[in-house]
Amino acid sequence: MNDEVNELETRIAELRQQEKRLQQDVASLQASYNAMLQKQVAEAQMALGRVVQESLSELEQRRQKLQIAVEQLERRQERIRNEMKTSFAGVSQDLAIRVQGFKDYLVGSLQDLATSAEQLQLTPASEPEPRRGVRSENREEVRSEARSEARSESRSGMRSDAKSGMEEALIPKFAESNLQEQTKRINKLLDQYRMMPDYYGQPWQLRRTFEPIHADRVSNWFFTQGGRGSLKSLGSRLQNILVASAVISVLRDLYGDRVRVLVLGDSPERLGEWRRGLQDCLGVSRADFGSDQGIVLFEAPEPLVQRAERLLKQKQLPIILIDESEGFINLALLQFPLWLAFASDPTNPMVY
């Protein structure tokens, strides 16, 4: 009995020692696992940090390269601008406009001078008074000559009145209610531009998409303002040029080659936009622009006024188009029968 008890105690002691060893092994394994896990986490963090750092370095290098490229492009742009300002190619258009304006001024001045010289009446030398003994026949001759001069002056006055009446007949009057045929023709053309656009039509015919908003403005200018007034800008110079092109197309249909287009802008750049826009909308070429052609571009109102006056004397029909950039309108422009100015709209500013 005692032997069995001793054996059991010995067995229990061995099991307790084995339990302690197992607990120590478990603790050792747990410590090893924790250490290994911490090491792996640290290595992963280091690897991730290296990847992030490499990516940031690569992005920083790309950013620096892009910044250098942008700076190079900006310097190149500035150099090109300076070259355009100083080279013949950059100033040729501005120089040509100014030279043409001065030429027009000289030609107009010479024509005005010649006209004034033709109209100048030199006073004849005064004849000595006849003696008291002059015969009655001489008095009758003097009276007859005076009556002849009066009749000739009367006939010349009638001719001048007829001439002025003819000039008035050449000036279009769209707002008058009795011009029904002309009104129908204009409305028909506007409907045609809007519903059946001809993108490959003849030159001077509108070739672009024409919306109701454009038709409303053109109709208002013809019938409400009588061909003389301003329209609110559409917020884009190209849209304004489209409206002006429709006006030109209608006028060319009504009056043919008599219509001459005079465009006023405050800079060569804006006049260049007008030239390209009119070419695109009307199918005209560069040959249609020039002092003796259908379209003339002006940077100042004075030479434009002189050109318009000469065109009227030549029985031509000038249409003056004023860009939105013109802050003030020269009052001399308002004397002509056809002018269209685009007024800036604060709610719809110009998009450049």
Image (cartoon, helix red, strand yellow):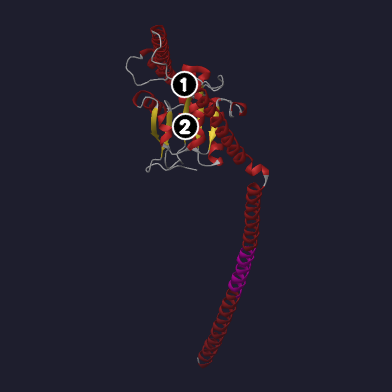
Q: Is residue 116 above or below residue 139?
A: below
Specify the amino acid type for callout 1: Leu
For the residues labelled 2 and 1, the Cα–Cα distance comes to 13 Å
Which residue bears the numbered disc 2?
Answer: 321
Decide if residue 209 is in sight here: no
Q: In this view, does 109 lie to the left or right of 177?
A: right
What segment is highlighted magenta in the picture? 39-57
Q: State which quadrant residue 200 falls in.
A: top right
Q: Check residue 128 for magenta coloring.
A: no
Q: Check residue 46 for magenta coloring.
A: yes
**Which residue of the protein is positioned furthest toward the top in this rendering?**
137
Which residue bears the numbered disc 1?
Answer: 251
Q: Is residue 258 above or below residue 230?
A: above
Q: State which quadrant residue 338 falls in.
A: top left
Mark 2 or mark 1: which comes first in sequence? 1
Circle 2 SS class: strand
Query: Depth check: 114 or 254 in front?
Result: 114
Specify the amino acid type for callout 2: Leu
Q: Position of residue 335 (x, y in %)?
A: 41, 29
Q: Position of residue 62 (x, y in %)?
A: 64, 59
Q: In this view, does 352 lie above or below 228?
A: below
Q: How crowded is mark 2: few (under 14 residues within 10 Å), some or many (20 or more)?
A: many
Residue at the spot 33% in from the left edge and 14% down from the top edge: 178
